[in-house]
Every structure is written in C-alpha cells, then in structure tokens.
Amino acid sequence: MRNAFGLKIILPALVLGIATAAPIFAQEDNGSASQSMHRAGESAENAATDTGHAVKHAYHGTVTAVSDTAVTAKVKHALHENTITKGSDIHVDTVAGVVTLKGTVESAGAATTAQQVAQQTSGVKEVRNELTMASNAAGSGSRDQ
C-alpha cells in the first residue's frame, strides 16, 4: 500500500514536470530552428552577393579585354602609319591600358618614336618599351665579314 501511495504522488508529479518542461524545450528548439533559419538566410544572401560580385568582375574583365584589344589595334595602326616605324618588327601587347612594345627596330630613334606614337594613342595609360635595335643584333655578325 505504501508503494501504491508513493506512486500516486510521484507519478503525477513526474507527469506534471514533463508537461511543464516540454514547452521550454520546444521554445529552445524553436530558438535553435529560428537561428538556423536566420543563418541559412544569411548564407543565401552572402551567396547572392558573391555571385553578384563575380558577375560584376567578369563584366569588368570583359570590358577591359575588349578595351585592350581596341588599344592594341590603334597602336599597331599608328605605328604602321608612322614613316619611321612603318617597316619595323614591333609586337604590341596591352593589359589594362598598359602597352608593351617588343621586337626589333632599326635605331634608338625608331624605338623612341615608337614609344611616343604609342603614348599618344587614345586609351594608353603607360608604355613599356622593350624594343631592341636590329643594328646591334645584326651588326656584330656583319662586321666580321
């Protein structure tokens, strides 16, 4: 009888304790779920922002490449039209508006002229002159003959 009496008191107290504790656990779970949803929303927003930045960079990269191609064409045309640099073997490369001149020219004056022609071309930000003189390369061999 004593055991039955103890169960009659303990069992309802246990049920009451579980019943009052369940909403507390549910609120914590809802809090966790809410935080998880919030984090997921932030992750989605960050992914969208990152995608937007990637598209923007791709666009600007494409614009820069198209612009560089146009600058290269303008410089090549200007070098071909110039009487001093017309017959020279000058290679033009443009990256972000910086023009690099490589190849062979007849004289230091032709190298200087090529640099000036490139600098005066629309869209050129800087010129790197890496031209060499043909007389220096061929001159040492022709003197021996």
Image (cartoon, rainbow, N blue to C red):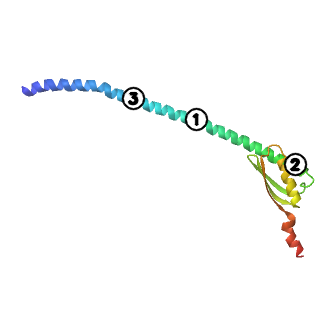
Q: Earlier in the sequence, mark 3 or mark 1?
A: 3
Looking at the image, the residue that sits furthest to the left is: 1
Q: Where's the C terminus, which quadrant? A: bottom right
* 60 displayed left or right of 21: right
Q: Amino acid at mark 2?
A: Ala
- Report how far apart the C-alphas of labels 2 and 1 lie in the structure: 43 Å
Q: Earlier in the sequence, mark 2 or mark 1?
A: 1
Q: Give residue 49's mark.
A: 1
Q: Earlier in the sequence, mark 2 or mark 3?
A: 3
The residue at which mark 2 appears reads as: 78
Looking at the image, the residue that sits furthest to the right is: 83
* Mark 2 surroundings: few (<14), some (14-19) or many (≥20) residues within 10 A: some
- Report how far apart the C-alphas of labels 3 and 1 lie in the structure: 27 Å
Q: Amino acid at mark 3?
A: Gly
Residue 24, percent across and down? 32, 26
* 132 displayed left or right of 96: right
Residue 135 seen by the camera: yes
Q: Where's the N terminus, which quadrant? A: top left
Look at the numbered disc 3 and give the secondary structure of its residue: helix
Q: Amino acid at mark 1?
A: Thr
* 38 displayed left or right of 90: left
Query: Which residue shows up at 25% across the image and 26% down it?
Result: 18
- Report how far apart the C-alphas of labels 2 and 3 lie in the structure: 69 Å
The residue at which mark 3 appears reads as: 31
